[in-house]
Image (tube, grey):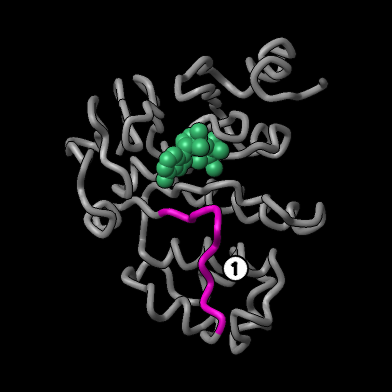
Amino acid sequence: MTLQLTGVDVYYGPSWILKGVSLAVPPGGVVALLGRNGAGKSTTLKTIMGLVAPRAGSVRFGDAEIGGEKPHAVNRRGIAYVPEERRIFRDLTVDEHLAIATRSAAWPPERIFRLFPALLPLRERRGRFLSGGEQQMLAIARALVTGPRLLLLDEPSQGLAPVVVDAVITSIEAMRDEGLAILLVEQNVELALDVADHAAIIDQGAIVFEGTGAELRGRGDLQSTYLGVGT
Ligand SMILES: Nc1ncnc2c1ncn2[C@@H]1O[C@H](COP(=O)(O)OP(=O)(O)O)[C@@H](O)[C@H]1O
Ligand SMILES: [Mg+2]
């Protein structure tokens, strides 16, 4: 199912935050949403997930208009969200996190731990004893066991050491290879272009570029203007 945002406007109180955002993620596609701090990336994901209601425009998933639906309803339609702050419970083990979230028989533990082998020896470990990278993988795994067709990832590499970022990338690639569609928000352009086939840039709440990853790689001008790369 295709996710299609068309002309989406979002306000926080009187502040106009998203300005006519249009963006598509096809079935099985991996799209990177890039942009500076404060550009509107997280707000875009929250709008898709139903955490923020659009004032104008439409959010369609397949044949359904989902703009303004509640988060649990959006999740039931097949969209899962991994927020920037990972929200791991201090006192729950890895297995307990997965058990309380599991809703789909499609993601038994064996399949989860094939994608996240680093979590396998940690199944009985509590959240507060996991490293940042392990928490990030668990946050993604917890979203997966709800059985989504589309995964929204908000800056999964944030705050992680390079070697751990590599493990997260490997997991994202494995999910892509399993046919999951992914909308990946990142400030790390290199990481995003490694895994995404399409990319969009958002700046001050408006989409200023949409194209293939290869096109964006060739556009040093866009990267320096909107992403602060090479400056
Ligand atoms: N709850 C909120 N209330 C008011 N303004 C907000 C809120 N959340 C974010 N903003 C503002 O909206 C803009 C976009 O934020 P955000 O979507 O978090 O950006 P990004 O994820 O690209 O860094 C920023 O100017 C930010 O300060
Ligand atoms: Mg953000």
Q: Quadrant of the C terminus?
A: top right
Element type at mark 1 = helix
User: Residue 43 or 136: which is nearer the viewer?
Assistant: 43
Indicate which quadrant contains ligand 2.
top right
User: Residue 68, how many percent across, how many down?
Assistant: 21, 42
Q: Label 1 crowding class (10 Å Cα cut-off): few <14, some 14-19, many 20+? A: few
Q: Which residue is mark 1?
A: 114
* Visible residue check, residue 45: no
* Visible residue check, residue 97: yes
Is residue 10 found left or right of 128 in the rendered image? left
User: Residue 201 or 218: which is nearer the viewer?
Assistant: 201
In the rendered image, the vertical position of residue 126 relative to residue 142, given as above or below: below
Is residue 117 found left or right of 113 in the rendered image? right
User: Residue 157, how many percent across, how many down?
Assistant: 67, 50
Q: Residue at x 61, y 62 (%)?
A: 136
User: Residue 189, how many percent across, how many down?
Assistant: 69, 32
Magenta-drawn stretch contains 177: no
The residue range painted magenta reads 81-90
| Main SS class of the magenta portion in the image | loop
In the rendered image, the vertical position of residue 207 relative to residue 157, given as above or below: above
Q: Residue at x 66, y 32 (%)?
A: 193
Q: Amino acid at mark 1?
A: Arg
Magenta-drawn stretch contains 85: yes
Q: Residue at x 60, y 64 (%)?
A: 137
In the rendered image, the vertical position of residue 53 relative to residue 231, given as above or below: below
Q: Residue at x 60, y 46 (%)?
A: 155
Q: Which residue is at the far left? A: 64
